[in-house]
Amino acid sequence: MTNKGFSDLTKEELYSLIQKMKLDLKDKIIIPVHHYQSPEIVQFADIIGDSYKLAVNCSRSEKEFIIFCGVLFMAEGASILAKDEQKILIPEPTAGCPMAEMADLEQVKEAFDKIENITGKKTAPILYINSYADLKSFCGKKNGSVCTSSNAPKIIENFLKKGNVIFFLPDYYLGKNTAVKMNINDKKIVKIKKDLSFEKDKDCKNAKIFLWDGFCPIHQRFTVSDIKTLKEKYNDIKIIVHPESPEEVVKNSDFSGSTEKIFNMVLESKPGTVWGIGTETTFVSRLALENKDKTIVPLRESKCKNMMKNTPVNLAESLSSVIDYLNNNGKLKYEVEAKEEYRENAKKALDKMIEIVES
Ligand code: SF4
């Protein structure tokens, strides 16, 4: 089947062909799907989850091919945790993440040295999982840890207890919201500006946490005024937002939490409850469809274009490439491999997170 062939099929023909290929390959492949993928992709998922759940499940899978329907840093993370004989594929290799691209390794190294110089203490880089292998490797090399939005407090706490100063990156809002939640004094939470100077009027020498100035464009959009609008429109509405949202938005919401927490809270809530949700809109729409006994509305429309780059057509191409590859008849579409030079230390940083969380 040529690529043109897949896009020429009707939806029904394409979906049944994907199901057939999945069945033919059932002992060899697993399809992890991130919560923000379109419903057209979600229907083919073997596991659905946020980045942490998918990373852990992939690391435990014995399947030879992992076709990761998410963005590139997630597939790359799976490749770092994969066994030697496993191959990681992504249907669309240009599915990047603007937040992950906001931290440059050379600048990060410079900022790390500046933090150690000004505090005179051992610094632990705590790296949000939404980042590429070069930074994960740097984090492992400096004995830090990866974290996710759900386990960031636990990971930070673990390193603070050992007397470390935290260098949190790349998402400023997740770092700030987590530090506020942990009751860290505001004077001791320091933003690192774009020119690598430190935020003014802060106690840099005794700071507990330094925050990189990155953000997710999808979650940064939410405002306090969005919350007010929904509160005026719906009686008894509960607002829950992702902690990648701005600090004021998190403060004015009823709850905040990872995508997995949002999913579970809504799922377990009583019929008739009303939810305003501040996260990626494709996910919110699916949640509404799957919970028709509740009223679920987005805080505002905010879609991640990169997440939408995986489609049934390119998923079919990936599956078909596995069949061709097994018949010694072609290249995998598209294999993702973290660079060899980064693998060992990046794995160390990911394993550290799993060790702390599971301890
Ligand atoms: S939702 Fe935000 S953090 Fe997630 S992939 Fe899209 S841009 Fe990156």
Image (cartoon, grey):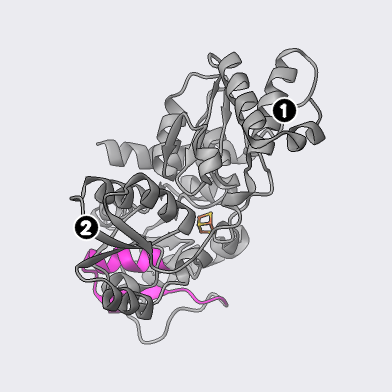
Between 238 and 341, the one lying in front of the other is 238
Q: Which quarter of the figure has residue 205?
A: bottom left
Visible residue check, residue 350: yes
In this view, 254 is above or below 151: below
Q: Which quarter of the figure has residue 250?
A: bottom left
- Which one is earlier in the sequence, the residue at label 2 or at label 1? 2
Q: Secondary structure at mark 1?
A: loop
Between 358 and 16, the one lying in front of the other is 16
Tell me if the residue at label 1 has its CB under 8 Å from ligand 1: no
Numbered tag placed on residue 332 in the rendering: 1
Density class for disc 1 (Cα within 10 Å; few <14, some 14-19, many ≥20) is: many
Numbered disc in front, either 2 or 1: 2
- Contact? badges 2 and 1 (CB < 8 Å): no
Picture quarter with the N terminus: top right
Q: Residue at x 57, y 49 (%)?
A: 132
Residues drawn in magenta: 173-194
Whole-number angstrom distance, CA of label 2 to CA of label 1: 46 Å
Q: Amino acid at mark 2?
A: Thr
Q: Secondary structure at mark 2?
A: loop
The spot of residue 154 in percent (x, y) is 27, 51
The spot of residue 289 in percent (x, y) is 39, 48
The spot of residue 127 in percent (x, y) is 45, 54
Density class for disc 2 (Cα within 10 Å; few <14, some 14-19, many ≥20) is: some
Q: Residue at x 63, y 37 (%)?
A: 312
Q: Amino acid at mark 1?
A: Leu
Between 147 and 66, the one lying in front of the other is 66
Residue 241 on the magenta span: no
Q: Which quarter of the figure has residue 195?
A: bottom right
Q: Residue at x 56, y 75 (%)?
A: 194
Say how many tags the image has.
Answer: 2
Numbered tag placed on residue 273 in the rendering: 2
